[in-house]
Image (cartoon, helix red, strand yellow):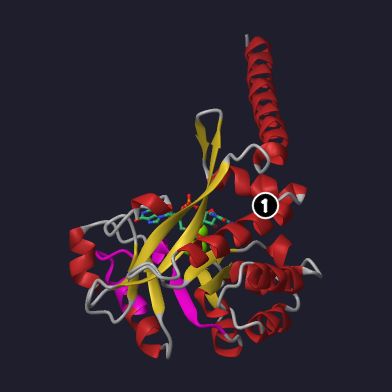
């Protein structure tokens, strides 16, 4: 019986693995054609000043509609990174975001900085800053309307993140450290690296956890630049956080939306 069961378990494990591999290969293939097939779109999520609820920025978030299936970035971004497809896709994202900034140029409310997420793989491309410069020129965008979100862990992993950030600043771009609080949260990083915005990850935002609230408050008070609190979902959270002198982003204000719905 045990032998039988063991075999079944193995079979089960094997089937699951096969499904996983098949799914990854399917997505990888589809991802290669996704740009040409116009399956990629950017949604934008508002960032609001908590004290006034004024819109102060938008984060561009990639959406992929593959044959009526919505594939989550959490599933396909890692595949895009591993295969290197994030490089051409990332360029498409940057260009599309710049085009949108340009379309909003005369808009009474939406002419605000747009944040774009960038992966490690994109940052270490030797031609990364040059390509951004070309895109900025071609789309004739004022660079101060483009902010690049780089996660804390990527900043730590990349050897010359300081010089890459310097180059990006020289182009006039702004930098945000994303997902702060999920990695090692090094004091060295936030005291030595030059950046405009710190984004605190939603895992650190837990209004019923006193210690987390103290840490959150302390980080905001010690920062001489804007802090974005991610993942605000409820009225209750908003009430607690509204006097924290920060910017908020989360479903409570708005989900990521296509431009026409903003
Ligand atoms: P992220 O940059 O930290 O983006 C924030 C994520 O939190 C987004 O998920 C957003 O939809 C979600 N979110 C916003 N408000 C709330 C809230 O109130 N509650 C909860 N539970 N979630 C909220 P999304 O769009 O699924 O993206 C996941 C991650 O995928 C992003 O995390 C980012 O790391 C990556 N990603 C998304 N778009 C891009 C892109 O264009 N390029 C790259 N390289 N990465 C991207
Ligand atoms: Mg982000
Ligand atoms: Mg984040
Ligand atoms: Mg994240």
Name the residue at 71% across, 79% down. 164
Name the residue at 64% across, 73% down. 155
- Span shown in magenta: 195-216
Query: Is 258 positioned to the left or the right of 138 in the image?
Result: left
Tell me the quarter of the picture where residue 38 sits.
top right
In the image, 121 versus 260, the foreground residue is 260
Residue 187 magenta: no
Q: Is residue 139 visible?
A: yes
Q: Is residue 181 visible?
A: no
The residue most toward the right is 126
Where's the N terminus, which quadrant? top right
Query: Is 14 positioned to the left or the right of 176 in the image?
Result: right
Q: Is mark 1 within 8 Å of ligand 1?
A: yes
Determine the secondary structure under disc 1.
helix
Q: Which residue is the site of mark 1? A: 89
In the image, 140 versus 211, the foreground residue is 140
The residue most toward the front is 106
> Is residue 113 placed above or below 94 in the rendered structure?
below
């Amino acid at each position: 019986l045990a032998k039988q069961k063991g075999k079944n378990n193995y079979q089960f494990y094997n089937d699951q693995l096969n499904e996983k591999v098949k799914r990854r290969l399917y997505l990888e293939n589809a991802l290669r054609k996704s740009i040409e097939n116009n399956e990629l779109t950017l949604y934008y999520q508002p960032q609001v000043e908590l004290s006034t609820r004024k819109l102060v920025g938008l984060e561009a978030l990639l959406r992929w509609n593959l044959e009526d299936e919505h594939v989550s970035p959490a599933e396909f971004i890692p595949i895009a990174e591993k295969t290197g497809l994030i490089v051409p896709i990332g360029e498409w994202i940057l260009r599309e975001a710049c085009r949108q900034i340009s379309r909003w140029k005369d808009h009474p409310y939406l002419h605000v900085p747009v944040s774009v997420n960038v992966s490690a793989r994109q940052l270490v491309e030797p031609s990364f800053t040059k390509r951004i410069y070309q895109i900025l020129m071609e789309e004739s965008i004022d660079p101060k309307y483009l902010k690049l979100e780089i996660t804390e862990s990527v900043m730590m992993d990349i050897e010359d993140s300081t010089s890459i950030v310097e180059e990006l600043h020289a182009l006039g771009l702004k930098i945000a450290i994303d997902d702060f609080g999920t990695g090692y949260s090094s004091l060295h990083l936030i005291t030595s690296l030059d950046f405009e915005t710190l984004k605190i990850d939603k895992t650190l935002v837990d209004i019923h956890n006193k210690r987390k609230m103290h840490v959150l408050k302390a980080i905001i008070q010690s920062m001489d630049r804007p802090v974005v609190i991610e993942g605000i979902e409820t009225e209750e959270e908003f009430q607690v956080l509204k006097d924290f002198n920060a910017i908020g982003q989360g479903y409570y204000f708005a989900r990521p939306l296509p431009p026409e719905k903003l």
